[in-house]
């Protein structure tokens, strides 16, 4: 198992984009998905809002990933960076990979001189186990948190 920089691996970058779209995006046909993945990978590689994407690789397979974004949505653009897209594939869940991803992204954020990261979620009592502190409820009902970069 190793932590990898997904922005430096086009195969995993495309898988990351597809999995994010399937998890958090709107349904797309196969052709729409292919076009979306191509366009989104170009945007990410050209700066976009993505600061970093870290993944866990095991046996030459992507297990999961997490990102740092400059912003996440239109509300609270005054806050940066945003801890986003924590995802572990179903077959790898329950094995501590989310904790590994959490620690890796917080370490990277600290190396980039950030004191805290922000995140929004509807999950109850999930991110608190990683040290997330509630700030407020956003207009869409999601809860806004911060985590100190230790």
Image (tube, grey):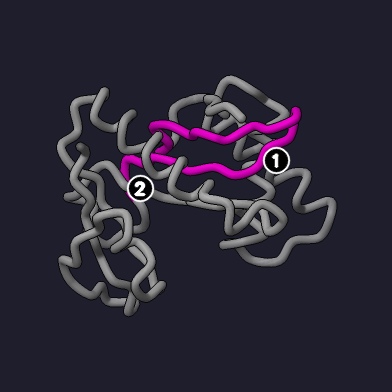
Question: 3 above or below 115?
Answer: above
56 is within the stretch colored magenta: yes
Q: Circle 2 sits on which residue?
A: 83
Percent of width and height locating residue 99 = 43, 47
Neighbourhood count class around disc 2 (C-alpha, 10 Å): few under 14, some 14–19, many 20 upward: many
Question: 137 above or below 70?
Answer: below
Of 119 and 130, which appears nearest the observer? 130
Q: Circle 1 sits on which residue?
A: 15
* Between discs 2 and 1, the one toward the N terminus: 1
Neighbourhood count class around disc 1 (C-alpha, 10 Å): few under 14, some 14–19, many 20 upward: some
Percent of width and height locating residue 94 = 58, 58
* Quarter of the C terminus within the rendering: top left
Q: So how many labels did they put on this image?
A: 2
- Identify the secondary structure beneath mark 1: helix
Q: Which residues are magenta?
A: 49-71
Of 94 and 62, which appears nearest the observer? 94
Of 43 and 101, which appears nearest the observer? 101
Q: Residue at x 19, y 49 (%)?
A: 79
Percent of width and height locating residue 41 = 61, 33
- 132 on left or right of 55: left
Percent of width and height locating residue 68 = 38, 40
């Amino acid at each position: 198992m190793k932590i990898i920089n997904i922005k430096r691996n086009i195969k995993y970058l495309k898988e990351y984009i597809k999995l994010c779209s399937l998890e958090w995006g709107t349904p797309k046909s196969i052709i729409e998905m292919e076009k979306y993945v191509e366009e989104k990978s170009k945007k990410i590689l050209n700066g976009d809002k993505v600061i970093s994407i870290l993944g866990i690789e095991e046996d030459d397979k992507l297990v999961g990933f997490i990102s740092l974004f400059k912003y996440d949505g239109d509300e609270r653009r005054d806050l940066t960076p945003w801890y986003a897209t924590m995802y572990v594939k179903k077959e790898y869940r329950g094995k501590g990979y989310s904790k590994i991803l959490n620690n890796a992204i917080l370490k990277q954020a600290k190396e980039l001189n950030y004191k805290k990261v922000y995140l929004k979620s509807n999950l109850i009592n999930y991110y608190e186990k990683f040290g997330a502190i509630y700030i407020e409820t956003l207009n869409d009902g999601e809860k806004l948190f911060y985590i100190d970069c230790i």
